[in-house]
Amino acid sequence: MGRLLRAQVGLAAALPALLWAYAWWLERANERLDLNELRDPEQVATVDGIALHYLDVGQGAPVLLLHGMGGSLANFPRAIALLARSHRVVALDLAGFGLSDRPRDADLTPQGQARLVRGLMARLGIQRADVIGHSLGGAIALHLAARYPEAVGRLVLVSSAVPGRLIPWFLRPVWFPPVVRTIVALCLHCAPAREWMWRAGVWSADVLTPELRQAMRLPSLVRGTTDAITRVGLALAREERLDLSQVRQPVLLLWGAEDRWVDLRSARRLLRALPDARLEVIPRARHMVLEERPDEAHAVIVSFLEAGHSADAPTGSATGQAVS
């Protein structure tokens, strides 16, 4: 073996360790904020010992909004404001994300997250609600609807992950703690990687305003965020099997036509598997369709939700904070 070949082999062997060390440094250099200094105690409810941060605004029939992997309720300022004109909107940070706790020993599987969402509904006096789930939040919404059918009216799945297919196929052979942790730290704290992810999620970078960038970035600076999201990622492998044919609620599948993260093949797979589903595709939009095309998305969502109010009107519609 020549010197050049040995050097190449050595570099290839060292690269994973170098990436892990760089990710370790990124995590410790960036995650320095204290969670309790950022969140309003009036917007926190404790469920099974976990403090969940939420926003409760608007008046009318209740709608829950569940974000995706690595996201938070801060991802949806336009969608929340529009929905709150006619509905009570409860947008929450799932356990491990946003300004919610980063628990070390909790069940962070999709079914575990669904159980926490159901507990939050009970804490807020919501017996039944329509649910909007984005990306991983869509898969959690499906687990919620299947396990607690009495609590869920209508489902809106926006660029939703497909239960049973939550880990990308090309990562399944290496889905181990050091690999997942390195990926999470790079996506959160390596500026070029983070920018690439954000830009890939939108049709036009114009939607990524300085205010939205700051709001999406802030939760990642809380101590323990990389560790928490790593545990959520690893928990995806322990997802319980979900029979989508047993999800009886009416479902709206809402997709950006150019989604690069969860493309239309996933939408069509859900469309075939769910008994009562329809698909709406919004052009010139990608994964963040709710923020890219807020007016178009809002019109489709509200039309779908209003169609069910006479037959399966959600209860527990006490008002939240008014929004102008």
Image (cartoon, grey):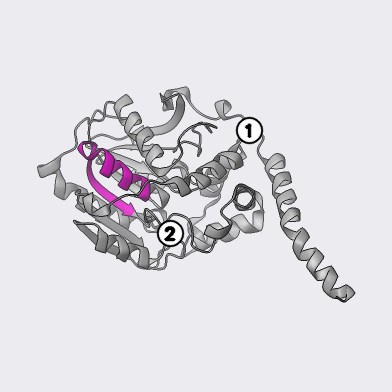
Which comes before the other along the chain, label 2 or label 1? 1
Q: Is residue 321 visible?
A: no
Who's the residue at 32% across and 53% down the image? 157
Q: Work out whether residue 294 or residue 220 is closer to the camera in this orientation and state it.
A: 220
Give the amino acid at mark 2.
His
The label shown at residue 82 is none
Who's the residue at 24% across and 28% down the image? 318
Who's the residue at 44% across and 38% down the image? 94
The label shown at residue 287 is 2
Give the amino acid at mark 1.
Leu
Looking at the figure, which quarter contains the C terminus?
top left
What secondary structure characterizes most of the magenta part? helix
Q: Is residue 249 left or right of residue 111?
A: left
Q: Is residue 298 left or right of residue 215?
A: left
- The crowding category of the residue bearing disc 2, from other C-alpha atoms within 10 Å (few below 14, some 14 to 19, many at least 20), is many
- In which image quadrant can residue 113 be found? top left
Q: Work out whether residue 322 or residue 302 is closer to the camera in this orientation and state it.
A: 302
Q: Which residue is mark 1?
A: 33
Does residue 315 show up magenta in the picture? no
Helix, strand or loop at label 1? It is loop
x then y, percent, for residue 245: 23, 54
Who's the residue at 19% across and 56% down the image? 276
Q: Over which residues does the magenta segment extend?
A: 139-157
x then y, percent, for residue 274: 24, 57
Q: Is residue 22 left or right of residue 238?
A: right
- In which image quadrant can residue 1 be found? bottom right
Helix, strand or loop at label 2? It is loop
Separation of residues labelled 2 and 1 (CA atoms): 28 Å
The residue furthest bottom is: 2
